[in-house]
Image (cartoon, rainbow, N blue to C red):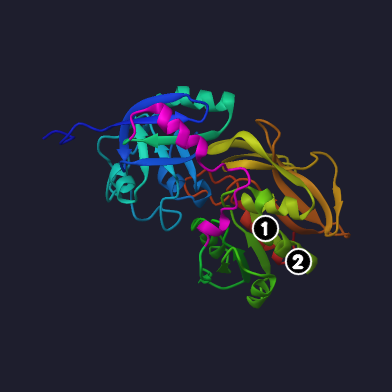
Amino acid sequence: MPLHATAPTGAILVLEDGRTFHGESYGAEGETFGEAVFNTGMTGYQETLTDPSYHRQVVVMTAPHVGNTGVNDEDPESRRIWVAGYVVRDPARRSSSWRARRTLDDELREQGVVGISGVDTRALTRHLRERGAMRVGISSTETDPAALLERVRASGEMAGAELASEVSTQEPYVVPAVGEKRYTVAALDLGIKSMTPHRMAERGIEVHVLPATASLDDIRATNPDGLFYSNGPGDPAATTHQIEVLQGALGAGIPYFGICFGNQLFGRALGFGTYKLKYGHRGINQPVMDRTTGKVEVTAHNHGFAVDAPLDGSTTTPYGEASVSHVCLNDDVVEGLELRGADGRLTGFSVQYHPEAAAGPHDAAYLFDRFTDLMGGNA
């Protein structure tokens, strides 16, 4: 029996600078737009697809063969696929895993995610590295690149976009502690991944996940031992409410831990700026140094913006002394911040990468232990 009952539909990909790639439709047929970014991970595509931080982004996979293990019901990081589009070179013709429930192609089609395959993803990635992340369109219904280009240039840009409210939970919920409860944490959902509260629960933390619109009073109502801000999509410079809430929490002395978007908002709350990276960090192989220990860890990243803070020395803020705690060894981008009080004790910290990393690596899992030490007064 043939693998395809009918010949696959042709598709085109057009970047906002006019560069065009031709391929075949993959996933749902139709048309989609977003910011073109590339991911260097060799595995974990299901976690990538369901990461809310990819909202409104078209993800180009640098690994040439994608879909080998299909899709299962255990690994999603959220309730749905969030990527705006998906670009692969050589999709697996059939999945091969005892955990697979359906193929990746079927899952993309079922969730209405437009993709393209048969594309020279190496050439596309090199283009994005040289020219920077940019808007893109994929279509299996439009055959004229010039017509699609017009629609690409009319689509929304990532800079200036406030997107956390579009991916956040609408209602609070609780993830109970595993075993004996030690602490209570209020977690602001800016695009949280399911593994994050799970990692905390493993350490005896009861996690109250709150909508992105939660107020300081909502946080206080959980009687928290600590406050957590999650990863999420969009431009941190377009966010004001969550920064004001965080400043109130820091002023009230609530211990803080932030990941990814939570690192950027921590930086802005402390008075630092943020800026858009040329093509961002996305993948599971980024080397980062923890300057507080001198250790190097291989980490999972997904960010297009970064904090603009001095790498050396500390900065006096209304909430204490702030300094850069983690740095990317590839390009010296700020990958973590810490805040200390007048007595030198840690009161808050954040990292730009993902220590929960369900697909690995797990070098940074110690940060959840650092958070429990912070709440216990042992940091």
Q: Secondary structure at mark 1?
A: strand
Label 2 to label 1: alpha-carbon separation = 15 Å
Residue found at x 31% / y 48%: 107
Residue found at x 85% / y 46%: 314
Question: Is residue 96 among the parts visible in the rendering?
Answer: yes
Q: Mark 2 Cα within 10 Å, few/some/many (few <14, many 20+)?
A: some
Residue found at x 50% / y 46%: 54
Q: Mark 1 Cα within 10 Å, few/some/many (few <14, many 20+)?
A: many
Q: Are marks 2 and 1 in contact (CB under 8 Å)?
A: no
Residue indicated by mark 1 = 257
Q: Indicate which label's residue lies in the foreground, 2 or 1.
A: 2
Please state the horizontal and vertical placement of residue 271, each as a whole percent of the image.
80, 51
Using the image as rendered, state which of residue 290 and residue 309 is in the foreground.
309
Relative to 315, does residue 166 appear above or below in the rendering? below
Using the image as rendered, state which of residue 15 and residue 88 is in the foreground.
15
Q: Secondary structure at mark 2?
A: helix
**What residue type is disc 1 on?**
Phe
Q: Quadrant of residue 348?
A: bottom right
Residue found at x 62% / y 57%: 368
Using the image as rendered, state which of residue 163 and residue 79 is in the foreground.
163
Relative to 74, does residue 108 appear above or below in the rendering? above
Residue indicated by mark 2 = 248
* Quarter in which the C terminus is drawn: bottom right
Check the image and name the residue furthest to the left: 1
- 91 sits left or right of 376 in the view: left
Please state the horizontal and vertical placement of residue 135, each as a whole percent of the image.
52, 36
**What residue type is disc 2 on?**
Gly
In magenta stretch: residue 123:
no
* Quarter in which the N terminus is drawn: top left
User: Counting residues from the N terminus, which is met first, the one under dot 2 or under dot 1?
Assistant: 2
Q: Which residues are magenta?
A: 142-168
